[in-house]
Amino acid sequence: MKKTAFITGATSGIGKCTAILFALKGFNLVLCGRRQDRLEALKKELGKEVQVHTLNFDVRNKEAVMEAVASLPEEFKEIDILINNAGNAHGLDPIQDGNTDDWDSMLDINVKGLLYVSKALIPQMVERKSGHIINIGSTAGKEVYPKGNVYCASKHAVDAINQGMRIDLNPYGIRVGAVNPGLVETEFSTVRFKGDEERAENVYKGFEPLKPEDIADVIHFVVTRPYHVNIADLIIMPTAQASSTILNKSESI
Ligand code: NDP
Ligand code: 8X3
């Protein structure tokens, strides 16, 4: 029987590439995001290969999250794999200049949103005594870099939540692990810099960044290990990156 994966943030970047790869590999999909046109396009494209259901909600809205999960049709109710991926950075400012709306966005989406979606889906995993939760953290959840303050805090929180989930869900045989990417070229920097494409593109100039496909590949590896194998925590960086602040940039690339 095909497994069902529930992916948040499936309309772009890492989530979208994971959805595409999972469809190719035969997973049924519940795809989430706020951009309806993109959800519909994905359903049309991937629905040719597997069963796809889309859910449009903002992870910040607790009621909307619970209602969306409750609305799942019978054939999508049993979720085998939850990929907590929705999230972004908003702004890159020293703490003294930080925008409080940006802080709210990052903590509400990256931390509380992840918790709400998990809260909605974990009970059925506990009841079945099986399931797999993959939390998309970041190198920013392992170290703090200049001006990264609150985004790094949100991803450090994901790291702690990932560990806490693994401990609390251990008696129920549920696998929990984090995938922590370094620099991946997606819409991430466009969102961080509020639509300033030139500034966003500059982040990935002079070195070869990860592609969202690279992370999708790792996520697929994680979910396809035998059930007794749980990949608890992975860090993936571009070869040119040694840490959040050490990047081998060469003008020739
Ligand atoms: P993208 O901006 O390309 O994708 C972000 C996804 O999150 C979109 O599908 C977006 O969908 C969704 N999303 C954002 N806010 C909300 C919200 N309030 N409610 C519901 N969905 C939301 O970025 P990435 O693919 O790069 O990011 C995915 C994850 O990877 C994030 O958690 C990010 O922190 C993490 N990450 C990214 C790295 C990078 O360098 N790119 C490195 C390390 C980690 P929509 O707008 O349609 O709602
Ligand atoms: C995304 C990677 O270095 O921009 O989480 O924070 S970084």
Image (spheres, rainbow, N blue to C red):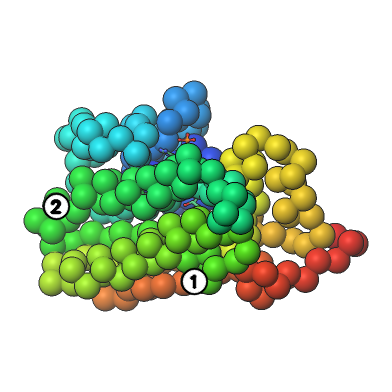
Nearest the eye: 168 or 54:
168
Left or right: 204 in relation to 190: right
Nearest the eye: 45 or 35:
35
Badge 2 crowding class, 10 Å Cα cut-off, few under 14, some 14 to 19, many 20 or more, is: few
Q: Ligand 1: does it lie within 8 Å of the C-beta at label 2? A: no
What quarter of the picture does the C terminus occupy?
bottom right
Q: Which residue is mark 2?
A: 123
Residue 202 location in percent, x, y?
77, 50
Badge 1 crowding class, 10 Å Cα cut-off, few under 14, some 14 to 19, many 20 or more, is: some
Secondary element under disc 1, as helix, strand or loop, is loop
- What's the residue at 18%, 67% (across, down)? 169
Q: Is residue 25 visible?
A: yes
User: Depth-wise, is mark 1 or mark 2 nearer the camera?
Assistant: 1
Residue 173 location in percent, x, y?
18, 69
Residue 243 location in percent, x, y?
63, 73
Secondary element under disc 2, as helix, strand or loop, is helix
- What's the residue at 59%, 41% (across, down)? 191
Q: Is residue 179 visible?
A: no
Residue 158: image quadrant is: bottom left
Separation of disc 1 and disc 2 at Cα?
A: 29 Å
Q: Which residue is mark 1?
A: 142
Look at the picture and state if 96 lies above or below 173: above
Amino acid residing under circle 2 = Pro
Total marks shown come to 2
Left or right: 38 in relation to 239: left
Look at the picture and state if 72 lies above or below 215: above
Q: Ligand 2: does it lie within 8 Å of the C-beta at label 1? A: no
- The mark nearer the N terminus, 1 or 2, is 2
Nearest the eye: 2 or 135:
135
- What's the residue at 28%, 46% (across, down)? 117
Does the residue at mark 1 contact the one at mark 2 (Cβ under 8 Å)? no
